[in-house]
Image: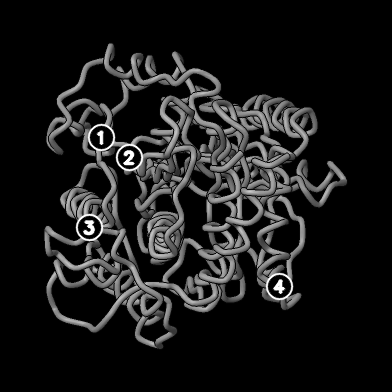
Amino acid sequence: MAAKLLSTSLLTLLLISLFYSISAATNEDTTTKTMEEFSGYPTDSHHSILSFSLNSFSVESEKLQSQARVIDELSTLSDSPAPAVTRILYSEKDNLARRFIKGIMEQVGLSVREDAVGNIYGRWDGSEKGLPAVATGSHIDAIPFSGKYDGVVGVLGALEAINVLRRSGFQPKRPLEVIMFTSEEPTRFGISCLGSRLLAGSEALVNTLKLAADAQNISFFDAAKSAGYNLSPDDLSKMVLAEGSYAAFVELHIEQGPLLEEEGLSIGIVTAIAAPASIKVEFEGNGGHAGAVLMPNRNDAGLAAAELALAVERHVLESGSIDTVGTVGILELHPGAINSIPSKSHIEIDIRDIDENRRNGVIEKVHKTAINISQNRQVKLSEFKIINQDPPALSDKSVIDSMKFSTEQLNLSHKFMISRAYHDSLFMARISPMGMIFIPCYKGYSHKPEEYASIEDISNGVKVLALTLAKLSLE
């Protein structure tokens, strides 16, 4: 009982500090200064977090502005011109961004390490040795021509949450750890949440990566080597974390949907993450000259793909649930000439639902329809491959309660909601109790340059995350 009262008292004192502390200083055009601004600590090696004073809690507009500057600085490490961001796994820009994040982690005072595939960990040790850490984090890779907030808010926001706690004088009982996950996006090798999947244990993924190659036929292992990760299949198998390796995991993220903004709410407390499934389909026909082959004599692989794409929409709507969604995000035709009948087609399908059985039922219908299309159009269904078929994840009650407590203590409006996008949290839920904090984003835009979250909303998310981490670290 005394320990519980002590924890409550510490959190009350922390709450007072939280209202007065989100980092930085003034702007200079150097990476060192940018990292120093964000961390809130100078590069002086004699600096100690024990020397904080009440002056560090003063509210200045520059403190909010510095967060925006760091996000902008990271967005320049991109293979596409602003305002778009493109940052692909193991590319030069990805490597530069990794160094940038490690630099901030070190500046904040965290001990930094990387694993075999480049998941980056920054740890703040707790007062009691041997306890599993409370973890937070997200990703910084970005699909082609996307925005600068997806994932990034969850990494930089996590580091700022650590800043808030350190400047307040808080000392965690359990260690706190910030994780930057490798390749949450499936852009290069078609595998989403690569880093967190490996941590959760996936022998199937290890086998897939042995044969994986990108569009330029560069193997996964060669790509990793070019980025400084000289690994083997055995290294991947050794990455698996046992259940309970972390005491909890909490991810801060933009909503990637319009609900919070439309309803004028500050925070979304995620109760479940929808289950994604990815499918690759290929049809083969005869092809031929667009003028010379008459319509009754055609075996058009392109029309087969188009028909299946429409069937995906139909079968998803037939589910009768607003939570069932389907997307044909890739449709490629060969040879790809205006005056040539497609002889080959390749489509990739994404189907999601919070109900695993309902989603699997849609997949089965799509498969049957693909077979019927191939027979009716006399084309060959050369591939129908389910790349991944993940189960949904439920947020843990203890983490939900901590997020709710933090939001209420900070007097922020909130709602409970489902994440229809997948996140690294989906796989961290297999290792530890999991939860997610959503903040609003403009019109729900994401995966496009118009993606935007206000610095005020980011700051609200950071404060909720900081208090949640503090609460969980004392349990």
Name the residue located 69 percent from the left edge and 72 percent from the top edge.
412
Mark 1 crowd level (few <14, some 14–19, many ≥20, 10 Å Cα)? some
Residue that numbered label 1 is attached to: 114
Q: Residue furthest bottom?
A: 61
- Taking the image as drawn, is residue 151 in sight? no
| Frontmost residue, 318 versus 172 | 172
Residue that numbered label 2 is attached to: 121
Q: Secondary structure at mark 3?
A: helix
Given the image, on which type of amino acid does mark 2 rest? Answer: Tyr
In which quadrant of the rendered view does residue 74 lie?
A: bottom left
| Frontmost residue, 342 versus 212 | 212
The Cα atoms of the two marked residues, 2 and 3, are separated by 14 Å
- Taking the image as drawn, is residue 56 in sight? yes
Above or below — where is 216 with respect to 458?
above
- Horizontal side, residue 365 vs residue 219: left or right: right
Percent of width and height locating residue 437: 61, 56
Residue that numbered label 4 is attached to: 411
Q: Secondary structure at mark 2?
A: strand
